[in-house]
Image: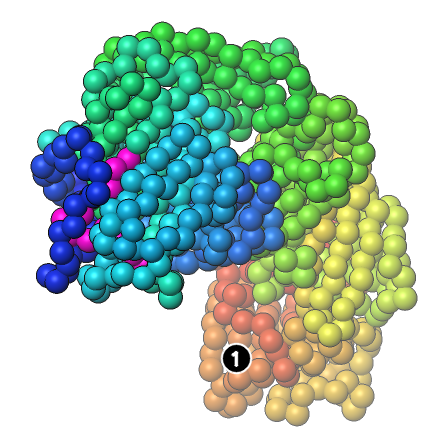
């Protein structure tokens, strides 16, 4: 299991998983009884109830050969999902039992496995599922229930009783053929830490005390009837387990070692019996089957440290194996693992888990005392790194799982990003060429980014996992010192593109300024476009002249705008820096207009029929042709006579439309009426203004806006202290020239 930190939980205990009983079942002894007695076992009670909690958890599932497994059912609490084609899963909620996250993994043809660990807000898990069949660690045997049978996997032996079976769900006696699938996990193999149930060897003794285990082997037995029903040992029956002593673990052995079964609901090992030493084996009896572990219980100690490369950089997300357990370093290269006391162990980093650089780095750790913390640091060779950041400008988090695939579907170890989306991936040492950065978000959205591995470090621009067609986007700024900054653009309904006379395009926004004075609907690429971003107070943080590629989608009424060029960046520390800007945003067409001056007749203005008669002459009239504002007109007057405002307001009052908002001050008056998609807005400003579409720079004082088919929520236009006269500003020409912005 992939863990950022492994710490054992002080928790409540859980119910012994019972076998099944049948009143008619005869108590048939083994034909050759094992001399090892079956001890009386006190049932241990622990909490088994899962509660759903919000967290970010992802991971990947592989088989014993390292092949990724798709279609694995991942179940936790009330949630069940499938791993995708890359073997990856992602959860935003998980079932938690006494502060342990418990997750079950099932797939036809494989041994089911339950993994569990202390709950963390963000984590990545590595799961290995063992395929059923006959090989070095598994066996599949079919035999009659009426015969005593010995099951074997390597040197692991299980003596099954004669006539000792029942159907698990009913308790009924079973006498047909039994199919037994057996798996044996040797604790000295690299497979052990990610293939064993649980993952951290946390356990509860019969006295309800919590311990860490030193395993001498784990065996799992799955029994099925001829028609596929789950079988168990009948009440009063036992099976005899004979564990081989693993190579390298044959010194200072005790005469007896407890047996432990795995409680899948609570994700804990529960003490249940004892095995006696017999030469190079330990022999014990069990009354039911799940996974059984031969373990020496110990007090807890801890091993911690930091992993750095030869350039003194922290090595993140690298697996550190400590004894029978494994953990992953955090973003600072730090690791921490809870270990059993009284036993020496080796801490190591394997080369195939870190860029295939060639050699294992290892340190020997002496036997520790209870509560002791042992610190050991690692130095590993430098390998090429790929760094970047995931950004989600849609709803949801920036947390994701990322990995590189390359050279005929080889892949690096998946990396769980930090909450801010930052990631570091260690590229293969000896591969140069095309690769793919694979991204899976916590919402199970997927994205791929193509890149070239060069043997050198690569820093990627932030990657937006939001739907490419979603409204909004992100701008990325690279400062001259290599620093990368981002600006997420999440436009309101009022912000978007305004097109005037098919020759001028403006991105109208409270904070983003982009103007194309030589715009043409038939042209997509432009150079030397004025571009700027300001803060909430109107102070520029980015100004520049950029290249723009712009495309209009008539079906969605949206523009896709790509920006790339040089800029001046003020990062907020009072010091400006030269840099580059790039990004892509999607915005709605707010309105497309045609302007006319000196209008003396309304016959060809197409003023919506519901509107009262407008004052004439009109100094500047704008016909709205299309966009989210619908169709209608924007009428501007140079007259300073406030009676024009009052008279038209009096006429609009008679429509009995809903008054959305109004402002009535000495120097500024504004009112908005609405009925469905019909809208009338009237504004009077004693200070004057330069309306949209006017290039003469003259002052106008009255503006009347009449809309039919308006798709914008006009309540957003209400003025606030922080965003003064938002709707009014929508219709002002923001000529975002660097020279203008620089004066702000």
In the rendered image, the vertical position of residue 265 relative to residue 683, given as above or below: above
Q: Is residue 55 visible?
A: no
Horizontally, residue 13 falls left or right of residue 687, namely left
Q: Residue at x 21, y 62 (%)?
A: 173
56 and 641: which is toward the camera: 56
User: What color scheme is it?
Assistant: rainbow
Q: Residue at x 53, y 42 (%)?
A: 63
Which residue is the site of mark 1?
673
Q: Is residue 345 visible?
A: yes
Q: Position of residue 462 (x, y in %)?
A: 65, 40
Horizontally, residue 360 falls left or right of residue 97, namely right
Q: Quadrant of the C terminus?
A: top right
Q: Residues within 10 Å of mark 1 (few under 14, many from 20)?
A: many
Q: Position of residue 456 (x, y in %)?
A: 75, 23
* Residue range corresponding to the magenta coloring: 230-241
585 and 9: which is toward the camera: 9
In the rendered image, the vertical position of residue 255 relative to residue 644, given as above or below: above
């Amino acid at each position: 299991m992939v863990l950022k930190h492994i710490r054992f939980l002080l928790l409540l205990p859980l119910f012994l998983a019972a076998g099944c009983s049948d009143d008619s079942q005869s108590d048939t002894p083994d034909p050759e009884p094992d001399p090892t007695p079956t001890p009386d076992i006190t049932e241990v009670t622990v909490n088994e109830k899962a509660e759903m909690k919000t967290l970010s958890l992802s991971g990947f599932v592989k088989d014993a050969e390292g092949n990724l497994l798709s279609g694995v059912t991942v179940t936790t609490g009330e949630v069940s999902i499938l791993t995708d084609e890359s073997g990856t899963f992602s959860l935003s909620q998980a079932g938690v039992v006494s502060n342990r996250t418990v997750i079950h993994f099932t797939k036809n043809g494989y041994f089911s496995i339950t993994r569990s660990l202390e709950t963390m807000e963000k984590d990545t898990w590595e799961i290995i599922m063992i395929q059923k069949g006959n090989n070095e660690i598994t066996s599949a045997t079919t035999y009659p229930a009426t015969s005593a049978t010995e099951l074997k996997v390597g040197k692991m032996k299980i003596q099954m009783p004669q006539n000792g079976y029942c159907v698990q769900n009913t308790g009924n006696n079973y006498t047909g053929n039994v199919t037994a699938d057996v798996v044996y996990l040797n604790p000295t193999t690299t497979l052990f830490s990610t293939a064993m149930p649980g993952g951290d060897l946390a356990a509860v003794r019969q006295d309800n005390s919590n311990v860490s285990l030193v395993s001498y082997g784990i065996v799992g037995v799955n029994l099925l009837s001829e028609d596929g029903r789950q079988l168990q040992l009948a009440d009063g029956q036992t099976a005899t387990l004979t564990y081989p002593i693993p190579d390298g673990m044959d010194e200072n052995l005790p005469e007896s070692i407890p047996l432990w079964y795995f409680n899948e609901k609570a994700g804990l090992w529960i003490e249940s019996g004892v095995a006696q030493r017999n030469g190079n084996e330990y022999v014990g009896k069990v009354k039911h089957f799940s996974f059984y572990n031969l373990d020496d219980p110990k007090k807890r100690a801890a091993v911690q440290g930091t992993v750095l490369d030869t350039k003194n950089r922290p090595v993140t997300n690298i697996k550190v194996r400590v004894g029978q357990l494994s953990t992953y370093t955090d973003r600072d290269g730090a690791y921490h693992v809870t270990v059993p006391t009284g036993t020496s162990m080796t801490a190591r980093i394997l080369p195939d888990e870190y860029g295939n650089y060639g050699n294992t780095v290892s340190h020997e750790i002496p036997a520790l005392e209870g509560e002791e913390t042992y610190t050991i640091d690692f130095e590993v060779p430098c390998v090429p790194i790929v760094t970047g950041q995931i950004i989600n400008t849609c709803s949801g988090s920036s947390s994701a799982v990322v990995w590189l695939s390359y050279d005929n579907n080889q892949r690096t170890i998946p990396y769980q990003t930090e909450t801010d989306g930052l990631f570091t991936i260690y590229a293969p040492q000896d591969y140069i060429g095309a690769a793919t950065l694979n991204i899976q978000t916590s919402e199970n959205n997927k994205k791929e980014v193509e890149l070239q591995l060069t043997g050198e470090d690569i820093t990627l621009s932030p990657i937006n996992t939001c739907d490419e067609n979603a409204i909004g986007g992100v701008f990325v700024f690279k400062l001259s010192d290599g620093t990368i900054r981002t600006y997420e653009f999440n436009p309101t309904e009022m912000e978007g593109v305004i097109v005037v006379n098919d020759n001028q395009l403006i991105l109208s926004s409270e904070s983003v300024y982009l103007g194309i004075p030589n715009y043409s609907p038939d042209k997509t690429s432009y150079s030397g476009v004025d571009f700027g971003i300001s803060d909430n107070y109107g102070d520029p943080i980015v100004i520049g002249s950029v290249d723009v590629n712009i495309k209009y989608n008539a079906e969605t009424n949206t523009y896709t705008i790509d920006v790339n060029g040089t800029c001046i960046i003020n990062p907020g520390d009072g010091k400006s820096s030269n840099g580059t800007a790039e990004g892509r945003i999607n915005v709605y067409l707010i309105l497309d207009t045609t302007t006319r001056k000196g209008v003396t007749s309304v016959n060809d203005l197409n003023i919506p029929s519901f509107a009262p008669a407008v004052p004439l002459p009109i100094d500047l009239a704008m016909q709205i042709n299309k966009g989210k504002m619908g169709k209608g007109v924007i009428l501007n007057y140079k007259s300073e006579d406030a009676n024009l405002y009052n008279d038209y307001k009096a006429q609009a009052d008679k429509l009995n439309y809903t008054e959305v908002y109004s402002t009535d001050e000495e120097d500024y008056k504004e009112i908005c009426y609405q009925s469905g998609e019909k809208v009338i807005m009237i504004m009077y400003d004693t200070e004057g203004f330069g309306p949209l579409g006017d290039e003469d720079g003259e002052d106008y004082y009255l503006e009347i806006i009449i809309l039919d088919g308006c798709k914008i929520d006009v309540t957003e236009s209400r003025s606030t202290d922080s965003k003064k006269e938002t709707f009014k500003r929508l219709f002002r020409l923001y000529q975002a020239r660097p020279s203008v912005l620089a004066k702000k």
